[in-house]
C-alpha cells in the first residue's frame, strides 16, 4: 500500500521528474511508471526527453503535467 502523497516543506505536492533519453518505444513503456509516480507523489510528472516526440506522445497524458524536449545530438554535426 502506498502512503499518502508526499508534500514539500511548504505543503505543496512534490512533482516527480522523469528524464528519459531512450527511443520512442521505450518512452511509451514509461506510462506505467508515470501512473505509479503520479499516485505516489500526488502530482503529475514532468517528463524530460530528447527530440520532439515526447511532447507529442504525452500531450494529453493524465499522469504528465508538462514535457520538456531537448535537442537530440547525434554526434555527426547534423
Image (cartoon, rainbow, N blue to C red):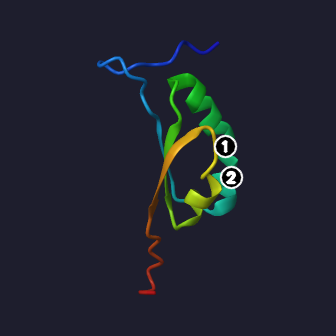
Q: Position of residue 49 (x, y in %)?
A: 50, 57
SS at mark 1 in the image:
helix
Q: Which class describes the residues within 10 Å of circle 2: few (<14), some (14-19), or many (20+)?
A: few
Report the number of discs.
2
68 to 15, vertically: above or below: below
Q: Nearer the viewer, residue 65 or 27?
A: 65
At a point 61% along the width and 51% down the height, the residue shown is 58
- Mark 2 — residue? 28
Disc 1 versus disc 2: distance between alpha carbons? 6 Å
Q: Is residue 72 left or right of residue 25?
A: left
Q: Position of residue 72 (x, y in %)?
A: 47, 71
- Mark 1 — residue? 31
Res 38 → quadrant: top right
At a point 56% along the width and 42% down the height, the residue shown is 64
Q: Position of residue 67 (x, y in %)?
A: 49, 52
SS at mark 2 in the image:
helix
Q: Position of residue 14 (x, y in %)?
A: 42, 27
Amino acid at each position: 500500500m502506498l502512503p499518502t502523497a508526499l508534500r514539500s516543506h511548504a505543503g505543496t505536492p512534490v512533482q516527480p521528474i522523469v528524464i528519459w533519453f531512450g527511443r520512442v518505444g521505450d518512452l511509451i513503456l514509461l506510462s506505467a511508471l508515470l501512473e505509479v509516480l503520479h499516485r505516489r507523489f500526488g502530482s503529475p510528472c514532468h517528463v524530460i526527453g530528447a527530440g520532439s516526440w515526447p511532447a507529442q506522445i504525452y500531450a494529453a497524458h493524465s499522469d504528465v503535467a508538462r514535457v520538456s524536449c531537448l535537442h537530440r545530438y547525434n554526434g555527426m554535426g547534423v
